[in-house]
Image (tube, rainbow, N blue to C red):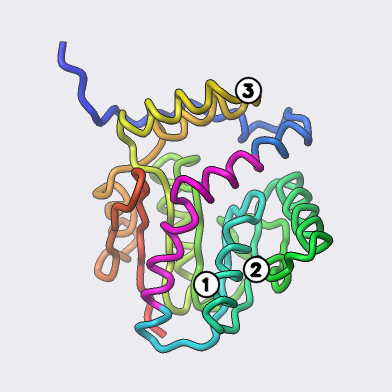
Amino acid sequence: MKVGLVPERSYEPELMDGDDLAYEEQADNLRDIARVNRWLGGISTLRRPLDRLVRRDGLRTFTLLDVGTGGGDVPRAMLAWARRRGLEARAAALDPQAHMVRFAQEDGRLEARDGTVANGAAGLALLRADGFRLPFPDASFDFVTSSLVFHHFPEAAAAGLLAEMARVARRAVLVNDLERHRVPWAVITVLAALGSNRIVRHDGPLSVLRGWRAHELLTLARSQGLGRRARVSRLFLYRLVLVVERGA
């Protein structure tokens, strides 16, 4: 029997979405996710399209909201990139889970004590809030982002989240997630097996199986009337980024 390289999308729940995990276990998992973002393309997948939009519009200052921020490593990296470019950037990051916000706050304080505030620990406001009901008026932020968030939801919920993010975005929404394919699934399965964290061993390969194809992300945008200015790019190591422009 021929086995396809693109498996059907999985809807099996991930351990990290449960509410019965100890804080330290989740903290270890968030540190591993930060390493994945840093070394396996998560940061660059978001930075590249953001850089193009900022350059194209000639921006010297901008605001950013990161939805489902987890440990907060991605918005801190975006702030650090902006500072290296000589840009003035301010960011807010939110997550619905209290332990995520706690970890992001503690991680930021550790960075500040290490004397590395320039990596983005400064200038980032963290709050606990529901991404499906963002506590901000329309067009509150230039850019609204998410990383490794959309694969946690079925299609209808992901489409609703995209619409809410688009509501508060003045210039663009950028969604960074995993491409569903057996090659990254195999790689992550091997790497996760080398770790000691059971969340990583379970959720790492499953995250890929819960990931997306480019046309599926475009379908989400079209279902919310956002398809006309939506595009998907496939980047290094099976990452996808959906960009929905809103205008400014």
Chain part drawn in magenta: 30-53
Q: Which element type, helix, strand or loop, lies under badge 2? A: strand
Q: Which element type, helix, strand or loop, lies under badge 1? A: helix
- Give the answer, above or below, for where 49 lies relative to 105: below
What residue sits right under mark 2 in the picture? 92
Please give the count of numbered marks on the rendered protein.
3
List x then y, in percent, for residue 68.
59, 53
What residue sits right under mark 3 in the picture? 198
List x then y, in percent, for residue 241.
37, 56
User: Is there a contact, CB below 8 Å, between mark 1 and mark 3?
Assistant: no
**Mark nearer the N terminus (1 vs 2):** 2
What residue sits right under mark 1 in the picture? 168
Q: Within the image, what quadrant is residue 114 found in?
A: bottom right
Quarter of the C terminus within the rendering: bottom left
Residue drawn at (75%, 48%) of the image: 103
Q: Which element type, helix, strand or loop, lies under badge 3? A: helix
Q: Is residue 47 in the magenta section?
A: yes
User: Is there a contact, CB below 8 Å, between mark 3 and mark 2?
Assistant: no
Between the C-alphas of marks 1 and 3, the distance is 36 Å
Label 1 packing within 10 angstroms: few (<14), some (14-19), many (20+): many
Between the C-alphas of marks 1 and 2, the distance is 12 Å
Nearer the observer, disc 1 or disc 3?
A: 3
Q: What is the residue that sits farthest to the top in this orientation?
A: 1
Residue drawn at (43%, 39%) of the image: 154
Q: At label 3, which amino acid type do we have? A: Arg
Quarter of the N terminus within the rendering: top left
Label 2 packing within 10 angstroms: few (<14), some (14-19), many (20+): many
Q: Within the image, what quadrant is residue 246 found in?
A: bottom left
Between the C-alphas of marks 3 and 2, the distance is 30 Å
